[in-house]
Image: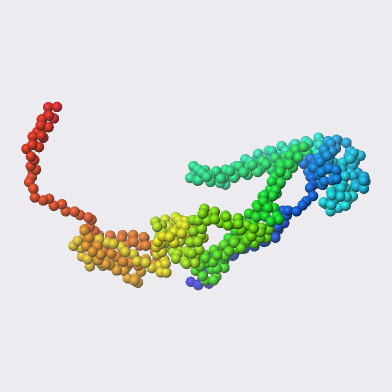
Amino acid sequence: MGKSDRPRHLLSASSRLVTHRRHSTRPRWRSAIAIALILLLGVLLCPASAQVNSPQTPKEPIILDGERLFAVSDSEQFPAEERADWIESELVRFAEDPGAVDVRIEERNDLPTILINDRYLLTVTEQDALAEGYSPKKQASLWAKTIKKALERAHQERSGQFLRETLIKAILAVVGVLALSWGLGWWWRRSFPLSSSDGNSPHLSKIWHLTLAGARGLAFVATALYITNLFPWTRQWSYQFLEILFKSLTAPLFTAGNRSYSITNLLILVAFLVGLVVFANSLANQLRSRILPMTGLNRNTREVVTAIVKYTAISIGTVVVLQVWGLDLSSLTILASALGVGIGFGFQDIAKNLGSGIVLMFERPIQVGDFVEVGDYVGTVERIGSRSTVIRTLDQISIIVPNSRFLESEVINWSHDNPVSRLRIPVGVAYGSDIQAVKSILLDAALEHSDVLKVPPPRVTFSGFGDSSLDFELWVWCSDPSRQYIVRSDLYFAIEEAFRKSNVEIPFPQRDLNVRTGTLPLEISPKLEQMILKLLQQMGKS
């Protein structure tokens, strides 16, 4: 039946299936392109995230009610820290005072001075203005406006109406986070019903519980930060917590060249390296599923090309990311050598398996789809990786075998070069059986089986005279090595049924016992006879 003869509903269903498959592959390409663009943008911005070691003017921030207003530098008389402490104490005093606030600028000693209610607050120096790129007068004008707005907001936040509204918001936030915590627990238990009683791993159950606890912890921390930000007196705690966290993440951990790197830099670097691996995997999947099948290469060759492209992309991408990031790889040569020696001793088995994987990929003693026997494992090769090979047994169990096993020990590859293999089926019949009839029965049973090849033809050989049987061997050829156990079993069933119908006896081991000459009953010596009589008499008296 041609394509035009198929039912219309089948054609429409198949066309919808093909269309769905085409559309389903588009998000993969889009995700791969998006990951590549993100990696490119990240690599270009990487040098900006590292801290360049250069002298900087010390500055201290001015904080009011947990909000940063501006930062001051050292002056001729006072360091930046003392200036900041004085300005913050004055701002707090004016914020607590409910009276009106008058902020103005006055020229003193050729420098603009900010006054609040005719009380001195600070003098804007050349260093203060230079850090922001303005003139002292312009800088003083901007700071005066900022101070006025901050004091007005501070007076508003200390009013009774604002505090009542804020308290209601805080109570609602607490109720909301408690409800969210309960909802997370309910949703978690419903979506991931993991427990050791259900046969699941207790470690996996602990991981899920820890994840739930972490999600709840983040919710409570976020709520606490939100509540502390509502009130002017507690907002300082939130600012200090975030400042400590920010300084911890941005504090330099080590220096390479003229750049310092912090925890944030390392996290970003790790994120980009993980993104690089994801991109390489996505590229490899696209090559394996869409591009390489069009070339006509066999499955094993496609796997080799995919693995080479994947690991080459990861290696080159890692070097490029580190170089653009600002790391001088030549300065890490000694460290890399020391690590190489340590890794060589600690991970020599892994290195050996990786080297064996490369040999397997290029020499190809085994290929994907081969039916092999390695030690006690018999099955089909599903995947040849860089470190290990996956074998699926006849019981549909995946066995992960290190690649070095295939080079260090003998491997039986039933599919190597030619998958056709011969099966030897031993059969024994009783002495006196018609051997020609036995031969015909064995050949008929072989020829009737669908998995037995007609060419080469089956053959029966007379192995010899056994202790209890006449020993034969049935030789048959099979093109699918993975079905040899089923073929052997089917032939035994057919042979036993045919023997039973033809009255051919299958022997079992027999032994004949021959008794040499002697007299019965047995004769004993007179001395032994007297001892037995005495013993019987003593037993009778007792």
Residue closer to the observer: 30 or 350: 350
Residue located 27% across and 67% down the image: 461
- The quarter holding residue 233 reads top right
**Picture coordinates of residue 235, whole percent (x, y):** 75, 40
Residue closer to the observer: 15 or 177: 177
Residue extending farthest to the front is 334
Residue closer to the observer: 183 or 484: 484
50 w.r.t. 215: above or below? below
In which quadrant will I find the C terminus? top left
Whether residue 344 can be seen here: yes
> Is 289 on the left or on the right of 163, as rendered?
left
**Picture coordinates of residue 532, whole percent (x, y):** 11, 35
Residue located 7% across and 42% down the image: 523
Whether residue 452 can be seen here: no
Residue located 71% across and 42% down the image: 241
Residue closer to the observer: 489 or 6: 489
Question: In the rendered view, how is the structure colored?
Answer: rainbow
- The quarter holding residue 423 reads bottom left
- The quarter holding residue 456 reads bottom left
**Picture coordinates of residue 247, whole percent (x, y):** 71, 46
> Is 29 on the left or on the right of 3, as rendered?
right
Q: Number of marks in the image? A: 0
Residue located 84% across and 49% down the image: 127
**Picture coordinates of residue 347, whole percent (x, y):** 52, 54
> Is 494 on the left or on the right of 310, as rendered?
left
